[in-house]
Amino acid sequence: MRNDAWIATRRSLLSRLRNWEDRQSWEDFFTTYWRLIHQAALKAGLSETDAEDVVQEVVIAVAKKMPEFRYDPARGSFKGWLLQITRRRINDHLRRKYREPATGAAALEQAAAPASLETFWDAEWDHHLLEAALRRVRSRVEPQPYQIFDCYVLKGWPVADVVRTLGVSRNQVYLAKSRIGALVKHECTKLAQGLV
């Protein structure tokens, strides 16, 4: 399900990133986006090591740009800006990786194809930010209700299997679905209260 409201970045987080000393904000940023950047680099054909380097380089590039970064919806979204930085770092690695003109040019052209990377980026953006919302909720709730929610909603187990495997009642399953689902929705809404 594609919903631009889910893939937003909070303005407050972006403004806090201007401060290098705000470790919590940088940790929030890293936790939210590193997997997305890493997966984009792997999708472009980079090795695990190069993908990890791309993540570091993108975070450093964002850190260097944050003092002058001003959100202007007319100029584009944070999502697009982060994609542009990621694409540049991936291309830098591909240029180094493929020094031979014939192989390198073809591989670079294929990996850097805007439609391909943007399509992947959009799908992964949604997925990774939903994952970030789920991690935040999981850290704030009791383990058993989250496990029930995970089995029933995320893994799609039938109610009877959840009841039998976890030793809970049907009511507990439906209650966990409702309560944890509301918390996840609320977390996604919080993420949506910023840039699109």
Image (cartoon, rainbow, N blue to C red):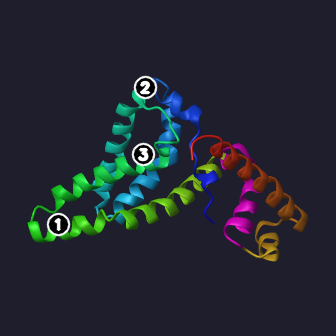
Q: Which residue is mark 2?
A: 20
> What residue appears at the point 29 percent right and 50 percent down from the top-left corner?
88
Q: Is residue 52 visible?
A: yes
Image coordinates of residue 137 in percent, x first then y, are 68, 48
Which residue type carries mark 2? Trp
Relative to the observer, which residue lies in front, 93 or 161? 93
Q: Is residue 148 magenta?
A: yes
Q: Secondary structure at mark 1?
A: helix
**Mark 3: few/some/many CA within 10 Å (<14, 14-19, 20+):** few
> What residue appears at the point 37 percent right and 33 percent down from the top-left corner?
65
Distance Cα–Cα, label 3 vs label 2: 20 Å
Q: Is residue 34 above or below residue 60?
A: below
**Mark 2: few/some/many CA within 10 Å (<14, 14-19, 20+):** few
Of labels 1 and 3, earlier in sequence is 3
Q: Residue 81: which numbered mark, if any? A: 3
Which residue type carries mark 3? Trp
Q: Secondary structure at mark 2?
A: loop
Q: Please provide the residue range marked out in magenta.
A: 137-156
Location of the N terminus by quadrant is bottom right
Which residue type carries mark 1? Ala
Q: Is residue 155 magenta?
A: yes
**Left or right: where 149 falls relative to 103:** right
Question: In the figure, residue 12 lies in which quadrant?
Answer: top right
Relative to the observer, which residue lies in front, 65 or 32? 65
Q: Which residue is mark 1?
A: 105
